Amino acid sequence: MGLTRDQVNKVALLARLDLTEAELATMTTQLQAIVGYVESLGELNTDAITPLSHPHEVSNVFRDDTVVPSLDREAILANAPKRDAECYLVPAVLGE
C-alpha cells in the first residue's frame, strides 16, 4: 500500500502543516519509502523468534500515588490559539 499525494496532503492539513508543492512532493516520496520499509518487515520469517514485550530489561518503577499541585490553568492556556475559560478550542477532525 503506497501513500498518495492526496493522503499526504490530508495528513498535512490535519497537522496544520502549510506545505509547498515541492515539500508535499518530498514528503510523499519520503512517507512512501517509510511505509514501504514497514511493509517489508512483514515479509520476515519470525517463526523462531520469541516475542518481546520490550527490547530492554526493565521493570516498572512507580512513584507514590500522592496528590501534588498541578500546573496553573492560565499559564497552560496562555499560548493556545483558541480557548475558552477552561479548555483549548480545536476544530473537529472526525465529522461534524
Image (cartoon, helix red, strand yellow):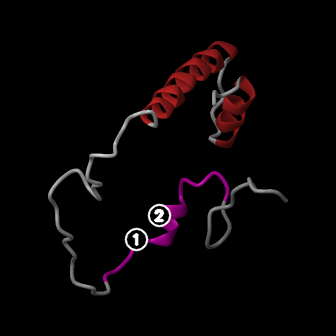
The answer to whether residue 90 is left or right of residue 52 is right
Residue 75 is labelled as 2
- The amino acid beneath tag 2 is Ala
Point out the image quarter for the C terminus: bottom right
Out of 23 and 79, give the one closest to the viewer: 23
Point out the image quarter for the N terminus: top right
- Was residue 55 drawn as part of the magenta stretch in this picture? no
- Would you identify the image quadrant in which residue 89 lies? bottom right
| Residue at the image position 51 percent from the left and 68 percent from the top | 74
Q: Which residues are magenta?
A: 68-82
| Residue at the image position 31 percent from the left and 82 percent from the top | 68
| Residue 2 coordinates in the image, percent (x, y) | 63, 27
- Would you identify the image quadrant in which residue 14 lies? top right
* Residue lying at the far right of the rendered structure: 96
Tell me the CA gap for discs 2 and 1.
8 Å
The secondary structure that most of the magenta stretch takes on is loop
The answer to whether residue 61 is left or right of residue 35 is left
Residue 71 is labelled as 1
| Residue 70 coordinates in the image, percent (x, y) | 38, 76
- The amino acid beneath tag 1 is Leu
| Residue 38 coordinates in the image, percent (x, y) | 47, 33
Disc 1 residue crowd, few under 14, some 14–19, many 20+, Cα 10 Å? few
Callout 2: SS = helix
Out of 59 and 38, give the one closest to the viewer: 38
Labels 2 and 1 touching (C-beta < 8 A): yes
- Would you identify the image quadrant in which residue 13 lies? top right
